[in-house]
């Protein structure tokens, strides 16, 4: 898998382009935010076609560029719970646990269950966490505003213990990190 991170000035968010090859063929985009001319150039300069878009959750910071993107390409757009309707078709993930796209298996990790509308994606040894987790954000206390976050961290740690891999973490905001850096106490 080849990963092309893209910092989007619209909302200061991270987007990720993934493809099986370095050039030519289909790709997927995770959380495209605004589909800028720079992002279009990155896709086109590698001779990619956007086959699918994955949203970690459905809000403006992740969807502003979808209208432009769908006018250029014809991707399938996947999202957890959809709260608004737009002028393009979005496939609600629902109970799916994985989706095949651009020659890759995109696994869906729902640590919130029915409590929220945001998810992680796992592709190979990479976790794409959107707004749910970022470097240094490992607190587990259950204060009134962090109950969901504490629940996410506990479930993330449980997942990491079970999988025993040093996943790379690619957040929606901030720098990439790894599970070993975030949770050094885990084996």
Image (spheres, rainbow, N blue to C red):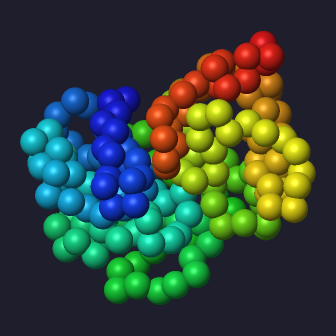
**Residue most extreme to the top:** 187
Q: Nearer the viewer, residue 50 or 85?
A: 85
**Residue at coordinates 68% horizontally, 39% vertically from top-left?**
137
Where residue 107 sits, quadrant-wise, is top right
Report whether 132 appears left or right of 99. right
Where residue 63 sits, quadrant-wise, is bottom left
Report whether 51 appears left or right of 92. left
Let me know if residue 42 appears in the view.
yes
Q: Nearer the viewer, residue 174 or 106?
A: 174
Q: Quadrant of the C terminus?
A: top right
Report whether 93 appears left or right of 87. right
Report whether 61 appears left or right of 118. left
**Residue at coordinates 14% horizontally, 58% vertically from top-left?**
37
**Residue at coordinates 41% horizontally, 52% vertically from top-left?**
13
Q: Nearer the viewer, residue 94 or 153?
A: 153
Q: Position of residue 33 (x, y in %)?
A: 36, 61
**Residue at coordinates 57% horizontally, 53% vertically from top-left?**
131
Q: Nearer the viewer, residue 120 or 180?
A: 180
In the rendered view, would you say 53 is above or below 58?
above
Q: Position of residue 80 (x, y in %)?
A: 59, 66
Q: Quadrant of the N terminus?
A: top left
Q: Position of residue 173 (x, y in %)?
A: 49, 47
Let me know if residue 20 appears in the view.
no
Q: How many numbered callouts?
A: 0
Q: Position of residue 76 (x, y in %)?
A: 38, 65
């Amino acid at each position: 898998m080849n990963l092309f991170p893209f910092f989007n000035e619209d909302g200061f968010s991270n987007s990720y382009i993934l493809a099986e090859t370095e050039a030519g063929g289909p790709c997927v985009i995770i959380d495209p935010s605004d589909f800028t001319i720079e992002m279009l150039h990155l896709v086109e300069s590698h001779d990619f076609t956007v086959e699918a878009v994955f949203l970690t959750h459905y809000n403006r910071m992740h969807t502003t560029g979808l209208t432009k993107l769908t006018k250029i390409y014809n991707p399938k757009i996947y999202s957890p719970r959809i709260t608004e309707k737009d002028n393009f078709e979005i496939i609600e993930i629902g109970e799916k646990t994985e989706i095949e796209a651009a020659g890759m298996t995109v696994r869906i990790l729902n640590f919130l269950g029915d409590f929220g509308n945001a998810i992680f994606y796992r592709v190979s040894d990479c976790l794409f966490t959107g707004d749910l987790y970022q470097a240094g954000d490992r607190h587990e206390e259950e204060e009134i505003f962090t109950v969901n976050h504490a629940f996410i961290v506990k479930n993330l740690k449980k997942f990491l213990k079970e999988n025993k891999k040093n996943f790379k973490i690619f957040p929606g905001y901030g720098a990439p990190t790894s599970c070993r850096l975030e949770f050094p106490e885990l084996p």
